[in-house]
Amino acid sequence: MKVVIQRVSTAAVTINHEVTGSINTGLLILLGIEDADTDEDIIWLSNKIVQLRIFNDEQGVMNKSILDIKGEILLISQFTLHASTKKGNRPSYLKASKPAIAIPIYERTIEQIEKDLGKKIATGIFGADMKVSLINDGPVTIIIDTKNKE
């Protein structure tokens, strides 16, 4: 699994001119899924997301987690995170899972994050043409790959 995590003041996803998910202070997470992803990846990633200390404390130091600030999460599926640009100028998406594999993993990821966060999260709709808007706070953007834990 690959994710791009953005600390936001606000974020929303619109599908067919209708807002289907929105948050205030919290995290916008773009999620890419590949066939090799497992429940172990889901659990590890969810824990990392909710424990990640990227919100400012009273001294202005990034020392608080989404749990500490009681923030919100907007999770968006994004197969293009697995783009390969090694050859040519047209990205290849062969590593990205097809819907039959990706949708159950996406749904389990939502469930795990909600469990670890202790509340519902906002989402887009898997495979839909989504318009995502955000105000990146900081800006703070973190990239995590469960297959390359650095």
Image (cartoon, rainbow, N blue to C red):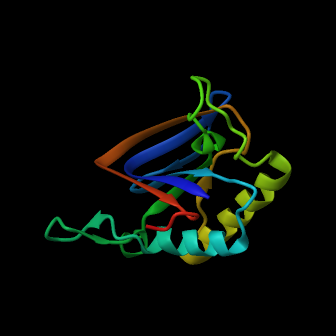
Q: Nearer the viewer, residue 78 or 120?
A: 78
For the C terminus, the image quarter is bottom left
Q: Position of residue 15 (x, y in %)?
A: 66, 33
Q: Is residue 137 above or below residue 80?
A: below
Q: Nearer the viewer, residue 97 or 67?
A: 97
Q: Residue at position x 46%, y 45% from top? A: 11
> In this image, 37 relative to 52: left or right?
right
Q: Is residue 22 above or below residue 57?
A: above
- Outermost residue toward the front? 87
Q: Nearer the viewer, residue 135 or 93?
A: 93
> In this image, 136 relative to 102: left or right?
left
- Outermost residue toward the right? 100
Q: Residue at position x 75%, y 49% from top? A: 97
Q: Residue at position x 59%, y 24% from top? A: 88
> In this image, 17 relative to 55: left or right?
right
Residue 118 seen anywhere in this rendered image of the structure: no
Q: Residue at position x 68%, y 38% from top? A: 93
Q: Is residue 129 above or below residue 35?
A: above
